[in-house]
Image (cartoon, rainbow, N blue to C red):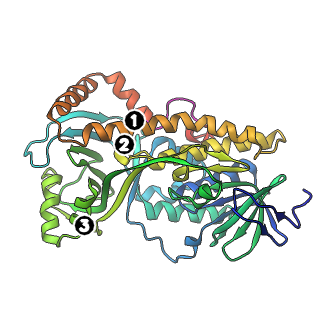
Amino acid sequence: MSGLSEPAVAPSPYTGAGVFLAPAVLFDVAIVGGGMAGLSLALALRQGLGADARITLLDPALAEPAIDDQRCSAIAACGRRMLTVLGAWPRIEAAAQPIQSMVVTDSRTKDVARPTFLTFDGDVAPGEAFAHMVPNAVLQGALIDAAEAAGIELQAESVSAFAPEGVAMALTTGTGASLSTRLLVACDGARSRLRSMAGIDTVSWSYGQSALTFTVEHERPHEGRAEEHFLPPGPFAILPLPGNRSSIVWTERTADAERLAALPAVLFQEELEQRFGHRLGWVKPVTQPRPYPLGFSMARSFIGDRLALVGDAAHLIHPIAGQGLNMGLRDVAALAEAVTDAARIGLDFAAPQVLERYQRWRRFDTLAMGVATDGLNRLFSNHSDALRALRDVGLGLVDRMPRLKGLFIRDAAGLTGAVPKLLRGEAL
């Protein structure tokens, strides 16, 4: 690969200015962002490209001694299959709670009774739940351990500049070090710096809502049942965790969410009980409620020159269906398969036609899910009695159609359409 030893980088839309890089260290893949999508991708590419491939993951947060994330995530069946194939699930399973059933209600906040309009239960395969709830800190820690065991080079570094140079991408880190990689992957979140540096625009908007997320203890066992209560300000979700514990995702208008988070404990408890109900007996928060602003974002392109966007860097959707992380894991499986297939027949795995295959695979599914979650939020998060009557009739009809419900379950589990190998539980 001539020119990689002294890559003088010309002015580029990727850097915004001319940059001179010292002799660079060459990698096959450099992943920027050490969240769950980035770490999963590193493991998937290690499996697909083999032990000789040099893969690095860069994120300044890797220098932090502990993972400060009290949220939990729903891992669909396809994601659990992938994490099993990648060797991470055994490190997660003890802290994971299978979701055995789900009920959906539609009511006003102060309604005493909340009639159930839609129920889901059953497995996607014998003994396989359609989703599991996992604490983010457990998931992240397990993926870091698995990445270290797989020989992924983890660097507590940021990327301050990058530019394509022939058959590689030249990078400058935040500390001034120089790297070169055949493929650069942005997994650096919804506010992706790499996406901005690459000049890739997004279509985005704010919902004016924030989600309060925290964990509660309750008196009686949940028996693996998840509940989604649609209320005028937004959905109130009760998601089961191991033991008599549940994860709460409580959506309100942003000003109200911030007000609720700042309430004294006694007043917050009253608001919580009004929405939580009494089916599980007494309830009390065991982690601090934190509001997270909600919005929609979709990159106009998921790829660039030797660059791919994965996870929240490519798309951000409303959490109403619990599919945010699962969409990122589907990106991981699709990109890893496209790269691996190209590498095995001797092609340049960062060539435009390879990355375009990844984009075609993911873009329609991502857009469809984004439109669906946006529509659901607008349909349910309002005070219209006419819309409420219409949607309740619709929910009731779906509840009476077992085949349609089964299709919804398989779709939520990520098992419909062109499913990549990893999501089917097959090794690359």
Residue behind mark 1 = 372
Is 199 or 40 nearer to us in this picture? 199
Earlier in the chain: of badge 3 and badge 1, it is 3
Quadrant containing the N terminus is bottom right
Vertical placement of 18 versus 93: above or below? below
Q: Position of residue 238 (x, y in %)?
A: 26, 51
Secondary structure of residue under mark 3: helix
Contact flag, marks 1 and 2 (Cβ < 8 Å): yes
Is 227 or 26 nearer to us in this picture? 26
Residue behind mark 2 = 321
Earlier in the chain: of badge 3 and badge 2, it is 3
Question: Counting other residues with Cα less than 10 Å from the Cα at mark 2, is it few (<14), some (14-19), or many (20 or more)?
Answer: some
Instruction: Work out which residue is located at the far left of the displayed protein and give it.
Output: 112
Q: Is-magenta flag for residue 413?
A: yes
Judge whether residue 297 can be spotted in this image. Answer: no
Residue at 64% x, 72% y is: 157
Question: Counting other residues with Cα less than 10 Å from the Cα at mark 3, is it few (<14), some (14-19), or many (20 or more)?
Answer: some
